[in-house]
Amino acid sequence: MSSSFPEYAACMTERRRQLPAVGFALVLPVLAASPAEARTEPKLDVDMAIFASSDPLLLSTEHAGAVMVEIAASPSIKITNQGGSMLIIGGTLRRRDYSRLYGHFMLGDAHVEGRYRDSEYLNIGFAAGFERMLALDLLTSSPDGASDPGAIRNSWFTGIDAAWTPNEYELFTPEVRVERTYYTGSSLLLNAEALSMGLGYSRRTGPRTSIGLRARNSISSVAGMGNVNTAALYATFNRKLPDHTKILAEFGVSRTGAQKEMTTGISISRPGRTLLAGRVEICREDGEWARQGPTGCLSTSLDTEVSGLGGLRRNAIVSLSVMQPVGAKFVLRGSGEFRHSTLVGGAPATGPPDTFGDGATDAVRGVVALDWRLRPQVTLTGNVQYLRRQVVNGDRIGAAYFGIQLSYKPGSRR
């Protein structure tokens, strides 16, 4: 990506070079552990799936139906020492073929993450990785998916975080993360990068309750636009209920700086904004496969993030996921998510005024699946999905998907 601010680009590059080295130094004690002190757990998961849809890439063209076949392998290795430090190296290689029109895609990811446990009061984590994904798969997790679902999103990330508990009541959680994204096969989406820093503080006020504050600041840049700073401050509340239910709430405000864009040699500015931000999440968790009773999460959030569609976007998200065991070998799963995204600061500068208003896009994903545990390591899943996107001109494009998936997880014992 070419940045219009060379000093910032150089700074971002230098930080990207430094963070992996610092992170590796933090998890080096795990690698240095002797075989007698460390436990190594290799794993290889394999998935095979076949799906059919009348419009698999949501392109709104006639006679767009196709069958999709996908094979994925996910190797990983986990190293843990007696002190509680750990290192995980893994990834996924995925090949997806369509019976007609769309060809094939090589997708996947690679990642390394570690956690160094200095003591019961301090642990430090590091993560870095690369992802290559079809934008369609990010339909409700990124505002870019609804804009050009046939594009390929390539992204790098690296980050460091820590958890420090100076006493039995307080917890400090600083973090730094760098991300860079570029797209191939798209004339709409632009390359972007972001540096974000955050600090959280929470205090336990009871056996199951904690309150606190969380501050975050990010510097982002999109190709052809200037740097944008976004700062946010949240009040946080965590509560664990006796029936395995957790409640997380964050309420606050975010301040977005002015955005600048160069269009045909002319500099155009969008004003900064102060916006409400936060999230609420209610989850009931239970790890036992065959235990009766539904588990799941309901969440809603308001946030701001950098987008390849141009500048910062405001996201309103509602999601629900539910899982219900049916006997000893079956699990019924359902999930739904809705995302509404608008451009922060006014109409897109790249088009005539009021052409697309605030550049709003919507995305919907609904899934119903039935898992059948054939063997402890083998699961067969029947899956029905519905996906829909609304593009900036207001058109809605939706399609249903029907398929089956076979998963082999040698390490599974439940």
Image (cartoon, helix red, strand yellow):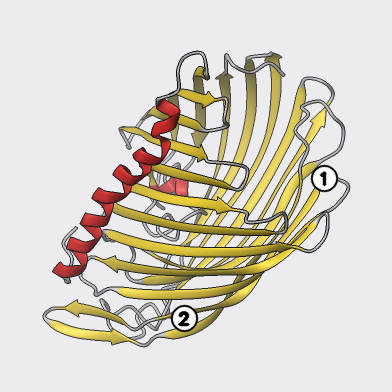
Q: Is 64 situated left or right of 181 in this image? A: right
On the image, the x and y values in percent for residue 31 come to 40, 26
Q: Residue at x 46, y 57 (%)?
A: 175
Nearer the observer, 61 or 107: 107
Q: To which quarter of the image does residue 263 belong? A: bottom left
Q: Residue at x 21, y 56 (%)?
A: 13
On the image, the x and y values in percent for residue 343 come to 42, 75
The reply to whether residue 98 is in sight is no
Any mark on residue 371, and which? none
Q: Secondary structure at mark 2?
A: strand
Q: Secondary structure at mark 1?
A: loop
Q: Is 11 situated left or right of 179 in this image? A: left
Nearer the observer, 413 or 318: 413
- Judging by the rendered image, the residue that carries numbered circle 1 is 244
Any mark on residue 255, and which? 2
Mark 2 is surrounded, within 10 Å at the Cα level, by few (under 14), some (14 to 19) or many (20 or more) other residues, namely some
Three-letter code, disc 1? His
Nearer the observer, 150 or 16: 16
The reply to whether residue 47 is in sight is yes
Q: Quadrant of the C terminus?
A: top right
